[in-house]
Image: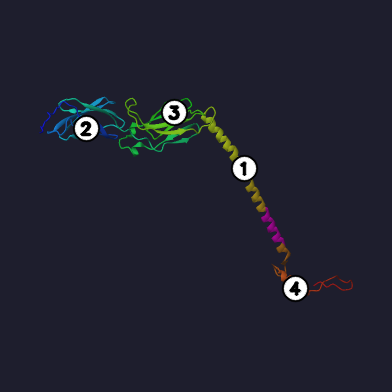
């Protein structure tokens, strides 16, 4: 024996198992189940979205007969905080949850350029990868001093660089750059962080930079001077050798010059040797032999 029992639907029950499926920068996908299984008619839900930062409310209506309902809440703000309430349209009991949207990404390619008495922070524009970011919103910069264990707000800018001065020697600093926080610092972008620990020990950064510049100059200047002196001596030696060779050649040419022929006469070593073998050796002149000069 068996009996069939049909339960009377209770429309005062709240939606079941409300939860978030996926959360992005400007949207959130939520999911819930009907107050009871297998509804036999369309059910009207009211989805209330409360902005906890701006203190505003929006209500959306969802009509469906499905036991499982999935709904996408749009037009949210990056880094926002929201309270979502889902209930039947007859204002029955409600189910609620909190959602935090994904904040804007951190700026890319954050780097430091060191100047004489200050440093410059550089980064890429967030607008290159974030369609929801407007350059007019700008960026804000923070600095953490690890020695003093304090964090300081340095300011904000709409440019892609920021000048930082008055850094102390011997202190390690961490700089963060992020999309400017809105509504009393409640909606911020992800920070890009960079450690700056290149300073030495001393009283101020300008003195350290000047000291390093002086040390470099003390090494470079003598080396350049020695190179110049060496090059000068080398040129003088080459010039003197050139002059000496030129003079030797001139003297050699003059010694073989024939005024009768009007040119210089040079003999090879073989010719000189043959003439020496064939010509008789002159040993001297006798007093009674007359000398004829042509």
Residue position marked by numbered label 4 in the rendering: 274
Confirm or deny contact between disc 1 and disc 2 (CB under 8 A).
no
Magenta span includes 97: no
- Residue nearest the viewer, comparing 226 with 256: 226
Magenta span includes 247: yes
Label 3: how many residues lie within 10 Å, few (<14), some (14-19) or many (20+)?
some
Classify the position of the N terminus by image quarter. Answer: top left
Label 1: how many residues lie within 10 Å, few (<14), some (14-19) or many (20+)?
few
246 displayed left or right of 83: right
- Pick whichever of labels 4 and 3 is earlier in the sequence: 3
Task: Tell me: residue 287, above or below residue 210.
Answer: below
Q: Tell me the magenta residue range.
A: 240-251
Confirm or deny contact between disc 1 and disc 4 (CB under 8 A).
no
Residue at image coords 63%, 44%: 226
Question: What kind of element bears circle 2?
Answer: strand
Q: CA distance from mark 3 to mark 1?
A: 45 Å
Residue at image coords 65%, 50%: 234
- Pick whichever of labels 3 and 2 is earlier in the sequence: 2
Q: CA distance from mark 1 to mark 4?
A: 59 Å
Classify the position of the C terminus by image quarter. Answer: bottom right
Question: What kind of element bears circle 4?
Answer: helix
Q: Position of residue 131 (x, y in %)?
A: 30, 37
Confirm or deny contact between disc 3 and disc 1 (CB under 8 A).
no
Residue position marked by numbered label 2 in the rendering: 32
Residue position marked by numbered label 3 in the rendering: 144
Residue position marked by numbered label 1 in the rendering: 225
- Pick whichever of labels 1 and 2 is earlier in the sequence: 2
Q: CA distance from mark 4 to mark 3?
A: 99 Å
Question: What kind of element bears circle 1?
Answer: helix
Q: CA distance from mark 1 to mark 2?
A: 82 Å
Task: Look at discs 3 and 2 and give the one toward the viewer.
Answer: 2
- Pick whichever of labels 3 and 1 is earlier in the sequence: 3
């Amino acid at each position: 024996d068996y009996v069939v029992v049909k339960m009377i639907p209770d429309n005062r029950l709240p939606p079941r198992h409300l939860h978030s499926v996926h959360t992005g920068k400007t949207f959130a996908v939520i999911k819930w189940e009907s107050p009871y299984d297998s509804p036999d008619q369309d059910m009207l839900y009211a989805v209330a979205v409360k902005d906890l930062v701006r203190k505003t409310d929006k209500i959306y209506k969802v009509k469906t007969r499905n036991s499982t309902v999935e709904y996408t809440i749009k037009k949210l703000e990056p880094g926002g905080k929201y309270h979502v309430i889902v209930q039947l349209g007859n204002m029955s009991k409600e189910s609620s949850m909190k959602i935090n949207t994904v904040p804007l990404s951190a700026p890319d390619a954050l780097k430091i350029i060191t100047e004489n008495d200050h440093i410059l922070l550089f980064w890429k524009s967030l607008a290159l990868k974030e369609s929801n970011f407007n350059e007019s919103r700008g960026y804000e910069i923070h600095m953490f001093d690890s020695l003093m264990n304090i964090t300081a707000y340095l300011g904000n800018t709409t440019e892609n660089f920021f000048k930082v001065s008055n850094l102390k020697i011997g202190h390690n600093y961490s700089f963060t750059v992020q999309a400017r926080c809105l509504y009393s610092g409640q909606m911020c972008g992800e920070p890009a962080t960079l450690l700056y620990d290149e300073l030495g020990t001393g009283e101020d950064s300008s003195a350290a930079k000047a000291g390093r510049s002086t040390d470099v100059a003390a090494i470079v200047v003598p080396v350049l001077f020695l190179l110049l002196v060496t090059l000068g001596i080398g040129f003088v030696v080459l010039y003197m050798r050139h002059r000496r060779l030129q003079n030797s050649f001139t003297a050699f040419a003059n010694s073989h010059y024939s005024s009768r022929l009007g040119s210089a006469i040079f003999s090879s070593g073989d010719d000189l040797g043959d003439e020496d073998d064939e010509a008789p050796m002159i040993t001297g002149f006798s007093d009674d032999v007359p000398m004829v000069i042509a």
